[in-house]
Image (spheres, rainbow, N blue to C red):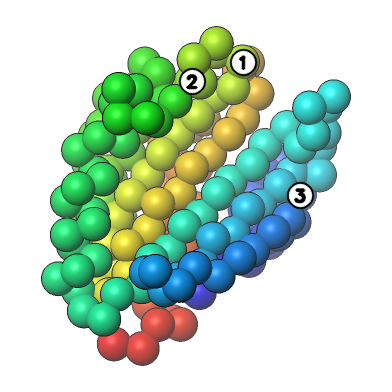
Amino acid sequence: MLIKPADIVVPGDTFTLASTKPSDNPAGVTGTFASASVDVNGPTREIDVVIHVYPDATAATQEHDQVAPNIANPQMGFTLVGGTATPADVGTGGAMALGTNSDASKSRARLVFSEGRAFVQIEFFNPGNDPLKPDFVLDIARKQDAAIKAGLPA
């Protein structure tokens, strides 16, 4: 159900699927995509995808409804600063926020949506001097949505 590294298009850079792990409560998968470009801290860009698969769409919507309003709220334990949640045209209830981490050394974005029985959260990390663009974030989310539609039985 995860996108493929080739789905992530950044001029002058490539991505690999650096790690995956299944989850079992709820069922699903987590994948981390890392850029080939590196600095002293490791890959300069990372994308973390979390997909939770529930027995029905109602349960996926419930998780979405708990998480979506808080994707830009640092008081909720998220380290995305300066962003405001806005609607995102992906899946059901897509919501996106762009900002930085607490010391502005990383540009960050978070996008959530549900698709049928699946709840999806995608987090993006770029260098602080390379702000994430909404069109790029949406492109990756739409590709992930298409992969879920193709790979998750109803």
Residue 106 percent coordinates (x, y): 59, 22
Horizontal arrangement in the rendering, residue 30 relative to residue 66 (left or right): right
> What's the amino acid at mark 2?
Thr
Q: Residue at x 51, y 20 (%)?
A: 101
Q: Are marks 1 and 3 in contact (CB under 8 Å)?
A: no
Residue at the image position 39 percent from the left and 69 percent from the top:
25
Residue 66 appears left or right of 31: left
Q: Could you give the CA–CA distance between mark 2 and mark 3, rounded to whole angstroms?
A: 22 Å
Instruction: Name the residue carrying label 1.
Output: 105
Numbered disc 2: secondary structure: strand
Q: Is residue 38 above or below residue 74?
A: below
Mark number, residue 7: none
According to the picture, the residue beneath numbered tag 2 turns out to be: 100
Location of residue 59 in the rendering, given as x and y in whole percent from the top left corner: 19, 69
Whether residue 22 is visible: yes
Confirm or deny contact between disc 2 and disc 3 (CB under 8 A): no
Closer to the chain start, of discs 1 and 3, is 3
Amino acid carrying mark 1 in the image: Ser
Q: Residue at x 43, y 63 (%)?
A: 51
Please report whichever mark, 2 or 3, sits nearer to the chain's N-terminal start.
3
User: Percent position (x, y) of residue 132?
Assistant: 51, 30
Figure quadrant of residue 58: bottom left
Q: Dot 2 surroundings within 10 Å: few (below 14), some, or many (20 or more)?
A: many
In the depicted view, which residue is nearer to us: 112 or 76? 76
For the residue pair 59 and 136, the one nearer the viewer reads as 59
Q: Are marks 2 and 1 in contact (CB under 8 Å)?
A: yes
143 in relation to 68, above or below: below
In front: mark 2 or mark 3?
2
Q: Determine which residue is flagged by label 3.
A: 14
Q: Is residue 108 left or right of residue 54?
A: right
Residue 85, image quadrant = top left
